[in-house]
Image: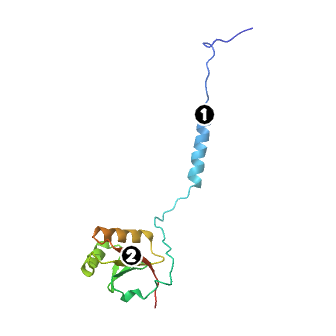
Amino acid sequence: MKFFNNKERALSIEITPLIDIVFLLVIFFVVTSKIETNQYLTLDLPSTESFSSSSINADRNIILLDTGILIVNNQEFNISKIEEVIIGIKASFDTSETIILSIENKAFHEWVITLMDELQSAGFQNLQIKTYTDQS
């Protein structure tokens, strides 16, 4: 009877099937992953009955429409030109006043956050947010 020594017998592990399985898993996850080009989140704000008002004539009110238009004291600004908006708001409001942001329910979440961030950077600390519904 022939016995094997540890010196004669070398253990080896085949990793070729392991590499094949890993590549198959990578391909599976790449094919099944959802890739979106849309980086915007829609913000569906609830509509309320108690706060609905005709906000266009209200003082201290900034309206953000779902088209990206900001209305400040009956002047329209584009949200992409946020620097102009902040200059207009600073000219119209005192930083100690409470600013009411009326946001249309289909406005992008990124616009709302950007507007609030820029207002706080400009020194406005009393911000309120509400859902805007067109009363016309």
Q: Residue 52, how many percent across, how many down?
A: 46, 85
Amino acid type at image mark 1 = Thr
Picture colour scheme:
rainbow
Question: Which numbered marker is on residue 123?
Answer: none
Amino acid type at image mark 2 = Gln
- In the image, residue 108 sits, relative to residue 51, either above or below, namely above
* Residue wearing tag 2: 128
* Residue wearing tag 1: 16
Point 35% across, 72% down: residue: 80
- Asked whether 72 or 97 is in front, the reply is 97
Pointer 2: residues within 10 angstroms few (<14), some, or many (20+)?
A: few
Image quarter hosting the N terminus: top right
- In the image, residue 34 sits, relative to residue 26, either above or below, namely below
Q: Residue 9, how many percent across, how many down?
A: 63, 16
- Asked whether 40 or 57 is in front, the reply is 57
Task: Of the two numbered discs 2 and 1 on the same chain, state the one appearing first in sequence.
Answer: 1
| Residue 20, picture quadrant | top right
In this rendering, position of residue 74 left or right of residue 35: left
Whether the residues at callouts 2 and 1 have beta carbons within 8 Å, the answer is no
Describe the element under mark 1 as helix, strand or loop. Answer: helix
